[in-house]
Image: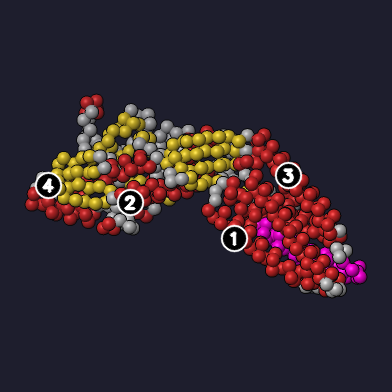
């Protein structure tokens, strides 16, 4: 086992070169790093929020607002389905959690039930009837429509998942490296953005719902009707930001939504003013083309978060699926709107529960404290193994240095984030690596006392200790993977460093010390072990 085989020497040499090359950028100034040839590694460690400072935000997804919107949409869907089927109805209203409607023609009551049951709702696993709504007949020709209890829970869980992905896309667009975005509880989202010192900028980008819809303007409503509050069913009054009218009355049902956009970018209109160019997918392009074909010379409203940002007249059908949004934009606001549209709309509003800023000074203190603790821990281990095992202890110290270089090199190469708990994991990794060498050296000592030759004692020491070393490291690996899978925040940082350390510790404690001890045997040809 102590033979200096070529593959072992090559593996050890390459690992040392890798560790040095990928760790080196972390100790060089940016000016020196920029001067290095392009083929050399330039990646530095990504430091977490606790090490380099940044912003911390805790949001709560407003699932109640989402549920209210779902009920409102269900009411409009009920109206649309009955009108499409030309079934007379009245007294359509929301009563708490229930949508109630009275069918005007008793002979068509059963037909209305069939139409609504066939067309309303969406499939929902685990729900009775397989749908997220229930439609029940009541006396006096009434029908009641409501969501099943499972629907609210499913909507809330889906809204949190969608919000996390949308937030991640928005933060990535800002260029923030390695943001930590995790669910807390059932409806909270914790965001850590290392290096982002302006939490208000994050809030401005993250907190906007950015729900874009295209809705037809209800041109039957006059200014007098608006003044008197006479808004017909199926329409709604929205505030305007287009600079031409203070409010617009628009049809409640959107003809096309922002979910069908494939791209959005900052552009300019024909007068050179900032605008937002957009493109629909195939389905959105067809809907948009049909609507503009049927409503020539009418106005449609472009609505963002329940505010009209533009209400142009349809001069010609728009069949290509492309268009621009004009309004009172600056170049920056048009660029921000395009970013929000590209990243998708939030399914529900977000409420800020907590906001903190970790300053760069606090981050520097954490880095300094972590570096000092790592240095003290490493020095203590070096002293221990050298005093306990002499020359073999020096070999272990060399393996520990290579171990640190490999961990830092791998994390720099993979652009993993190093956190303060991660430094604790690094220190624990070094202790485990020393423990492996202690097992090997103590086994060598036992074999030497049993009368074996130095070479045989060393060889048996590695062979017999290997099982115990593998057992200890495999259990550490399993623990690290469990913490990484189910933990969050600091726990993940600790677990990730620990998992990387398990592999590097096994390699350095076994192969590097093997090669060094094998080289010593070959050159010194000792008569006894220095640890006997």
Residue 243's spot in the image, x, y percent? 37, 29
Tag 4 residue: 139
Q: CA distance from mark 1 to mark 2?
A: 35 Å
Label 2 environment density (alpha carbons within 10 Å; few <14, some 14–19, many ≥20) = some
Q: CA distance from mark 4 to mark 2?
A: 26 Å
Q: CA distance from mark 3 to mark 2?
A: 51 Å
Q: Nearer the viewer, residue 154 or 244?
A: 154
Label 4 environment density (alpha carbons within 10 Å; few <14, some 14–19, many ≥20) = few
Tag 2 residue: 150
Say the numbered circle drawn on residue 351: none
Q: Between disc 1 and disc 3, whose residue precedes?
A: 3
Label 1 environment density (alpha carbons within 10 Å; few <14, some 14–19, many ≥20) = few
Q: Residue at x 59, y 57 (%)?
A: 479
Mark toward the viewer: 4 or 1: 1
Residue 391: quadrant of the picture: bottom right
Tag 1 residue: 478
Name the residue furthest front. 450
Q: Is residue 393 left or right of residue 31?
A: right
């Amino acid at each position: 086992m102590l033979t200096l085989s070529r593959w072992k020497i090559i593996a050890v040499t390459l690992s040392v070169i890798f560790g040095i090359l990928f760790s080196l950028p972390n100790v060089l100034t940016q000016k020196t790093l920029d001067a290095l040839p392009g083929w050399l590694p330039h990646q530095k460690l990504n430091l977490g929020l606790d090490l380099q400072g940044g912003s911390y935000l805790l949001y709560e997804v407003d699932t109640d607002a989402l549920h209210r919107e779902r009920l409102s949409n269900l009411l409009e869907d009920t109206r649309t389905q009955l009108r499409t089927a030309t079934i007379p109805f009245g007294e359509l209203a929301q009563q708490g959690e229930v949508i109630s409607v009275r069918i005007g023609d008793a002979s068509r009551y059963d037909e209305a039930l069939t139409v609504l049951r066939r067309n309303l709702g969406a499939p929902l696993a685990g729900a009775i009837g397989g749908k997220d709504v229930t439609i029940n007949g009541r006396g006096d020709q009434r029908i009641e429509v409501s969501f099943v209890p499972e629907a609210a829970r499913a909507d809330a869980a889906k809204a949190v998942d969608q919000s996390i992905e949308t937030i991640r896309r928005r933060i990535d667009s800002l260029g923030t490296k390695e943001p930590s975005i995790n669910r807390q509880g059932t409806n909270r989202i914790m965001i850590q953005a290392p290096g982002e010192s302006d939490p208000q900028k994050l809030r401005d980008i993250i907190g906007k719902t950015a729900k874009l819809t295209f809705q037809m303007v209800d041109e039957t409503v006059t200014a007098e009707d608006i003044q008197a509050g006479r808004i017909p069913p199926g329409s709604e009054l929205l505030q305007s930001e287009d600079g031409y009218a203070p409010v617009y009355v628009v049809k409640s049902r959107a003809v096309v939504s922002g979910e069908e956009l494939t791209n959005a970018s900052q552009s300019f209109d024909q007068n050179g003013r900032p605008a937002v160019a957009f493109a629909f997918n195939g389905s959105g392009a067809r809907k948009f083309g049909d609507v503009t074909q049927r409503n020539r010379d009418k106005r449609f409203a472009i609505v963002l978060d329940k505010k009209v940002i533009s209400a142009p007249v349809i001069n010609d059908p728009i069949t290509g699926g492309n268009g621009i949004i004009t309004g009172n934009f600056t170049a920056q606001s048009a660029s921000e709107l395009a970013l929000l549209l590209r990243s998708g709309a939030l399914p529900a509003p977000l409420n800020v529960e907590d906001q903190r800023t970790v300053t760069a000074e606090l981050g520097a203190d954490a880095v300094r404290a972590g570096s000092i603790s790592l240095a003290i821990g490493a020095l203590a281990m070096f002293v221990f193994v050298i005093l306990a095992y002499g020359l073999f202890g020096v070999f272990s110290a060399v393996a520990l240095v290579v171990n640190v270089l490999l961990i830092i090199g791998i994390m720099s190469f993979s652009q993993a984030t190093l956190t303060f708990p991660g430094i604790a994991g690094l220190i624990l990794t070094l202790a485990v690596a020393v423990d492996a060498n202690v097992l090997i050296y103590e086994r060598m000592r036992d074999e030497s006392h049993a009368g074996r030759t130095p070479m045989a004692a060393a060889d048996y020491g590695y062979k017999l200790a290997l099982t115990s070393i593998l057992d200890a490291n495999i259990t550490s690996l399993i623990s690290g993977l469990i913490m990484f899978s189910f933990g969050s925040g600091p726990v993940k940082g600790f677990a990730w460093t620990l998992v990387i350390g398990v592999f590097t510790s096994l390699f350095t404690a076994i192969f590097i010390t093997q090669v060094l001890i094998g080289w010593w045997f070959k050159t010194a040809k000792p008569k006894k072990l220095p640890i006997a």
